[in-house]
């Protein structure tokens, strides 16, 4: 099978429309149709069902589409590897980064990156940890730097810092007027939380479920690391954020940790990559740069935090 025919076929399958696929590929619709028919002739059966002006993969087409994606991915990675071996460390790195990494780490790493890898171009995608790792597995990213609680079998990672997540509230929240705080006390309040698919949200829900308590109710859903503390400040809302963000100017300086061991989620900050995929020289050097500089950046960040307010008695084991 010709790789070009497979690429044209995959575009038609993804868009479900021959004319739009031809426009995306910058070819004529007859050329695209001829390419698809060439594939169908080699296989000996149709690959699409035609529904008006749209096309939909039949069972045979769906099988070929899955194989075609793998073959095109392998061809693209082979092409990248050959070019980068010929050119040294010049090339492109697709980096996925969590909000913490983007706001606090990458700006400090960028000067060293420009100095040591001047011919490398960096494309940064910002997202939630689970979304980034899914994109990494799908080969849409080369490297991810984010907090993780566990690693997919398809991924390898190297942790460089601890990054626990804790329940937080406004410094003048009624909870802090109590002599002690129990997990059940948190059920009286609503929350600012990320989407239910976020790893930290799923972990928190599990804590309450295993103790037969109602899951936290999100009055506001927010994925923004900088917006969430401002939404919580001055309200009776609770949230669940990284402990290192407490005390950081314009982020968590007005918040206070609700000290419950049961709701302290252990987590590592790590660099993640595909376990058995080719890692370009530029990607490997960027990974090593993050691992070398990351611990120091996060340590400085921790020292810049304001001193924590006095905490209540720990309960909720």
Image (tube, rainbow, N blue to C red):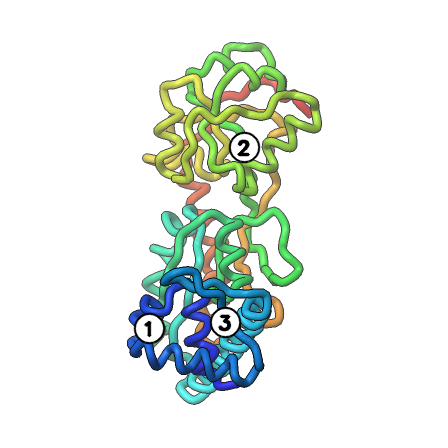
Cα–Cα gap, marks 1 and 3: 37 Å
Question: What is the crowding at mark 2: few (fewer than 14 residues within 10 Å), some, or many (at least 20)?
Answer: many
Q: Of circles 1 and 3, which is in front? A: 1
Q: Position of residue 38 (x, y in %)?
A: 47, 84
Q: Quadrant of the C terminus?
A: top right
Along the polypeptide, which appears first: circle 1 or circle 3? 1
Residue 57 sits above or below residue 201 on the image: below
Q: Position of residue 171 (x, y in %)?
A: 42, 20
* Residue at 50% in and 21% down: 310
* Residue at 49% in and 54% down: 132
Task: Check disc 2 and report the residue beneath it.
Answer: 166
Along the polypeptide, which appears first: circle 2 or circle 1? 1
Task: Check disc 1 and report the residue beneath it.
Answer: 22
Element class at badge 2? strand
- Is residue 210 rendered to the left or right of residue 176? right
Residue 256 in sight in this render:
no
Q: Is the C-beta separation of discs 2 and 1 under 8 Å?
A: no
Q: Nearer the viewer, residue 32 or 153?
A: 32
- Residue 113's tag is none
Element class at badge 1? helix
Q: Position of residue 113 (x, y in %)?
A: 36, 67
* Residue at 54% in and 44% down: 163
Element class at badge 3? helix
Q: Of circles 2 and 1, which is in front? A: 1
Cα–Cα gap, marks 3 and 2: 33 Å
Name which quarter of the figure residue 237 lies in.
top left
Cα–Cα gap, marks 2 and 1: 51 Å
Residue 139 in sight in this render:
yes
* Residue at 47% in and 56% down: 294
Q: Is the C-beta separation of discs 1 and 3 under 8 Å?
A: no
Task: Check disc 3 and report the residue beneath it.
Answer: 284
């Amino acid at each position: 099978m010709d790789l070009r025919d497979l690429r044209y076929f995959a575009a038609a399958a993804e868009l479900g429309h021959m004319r739009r696929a031809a426009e995306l590929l910058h070819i004529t619709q007859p050329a695209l149709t001829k390419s698809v028919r060439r594939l169908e002739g080699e296989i000996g059966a149709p690959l699409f069902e035609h529904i008006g002006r749209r096309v939909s993969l039949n069972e045979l087409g769906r099988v070929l589409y899955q194989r075609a994606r793998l073959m095109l991915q392998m061809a693209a990675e082979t092409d990248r590897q050959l070019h980068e071996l010929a050119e040294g460390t010049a090339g492109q790195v697709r980096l996925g980064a969590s909000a913490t990494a983007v706001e606090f780490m990458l700006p400090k790493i960028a000067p060293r990156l420009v100095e040591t890898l001047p011919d490398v171009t960096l494309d940064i995608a910002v997202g939630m940890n689970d979304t980034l790792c899914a994109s990494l597995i799908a080969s849409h990213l080369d490297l991810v730097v984010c907090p993780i609680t566990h690693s997919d079998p398809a991924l390898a990672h190297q942790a460089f810092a601890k990054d626990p997540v804790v329940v937080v509230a406004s410094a003048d929240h009624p909870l802090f007027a109590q002599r002690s705080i129990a997990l059940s006390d948190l059920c009286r309040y609503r929350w600012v939380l990320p989407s239910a698919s976020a790893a930290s949200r799923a972990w928190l829900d599990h804590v309450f479920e295993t103790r037969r308590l109602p899951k936290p109710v999100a009055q506001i859903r927010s994925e923004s690391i900088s917006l969430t503390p401002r939404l919580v400040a001055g309200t009776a809302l609770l949230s669940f954020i990284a402990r290192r963000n407490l005390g950081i100017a314009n982020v968590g300086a007005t918040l206070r940790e609700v000290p419950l061991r049961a709701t302290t989620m252990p987590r590592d900050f790590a660099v993640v990559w595909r376990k058995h995929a080719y890692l370009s020289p530029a990607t490997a050097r960027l990974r090593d740069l993050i691992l070398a500089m990351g611990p120091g950046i996060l340590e400085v960040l921790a020292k810049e935090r304001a001193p924590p307010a006095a905490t209540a008695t720990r309960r909720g084991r």
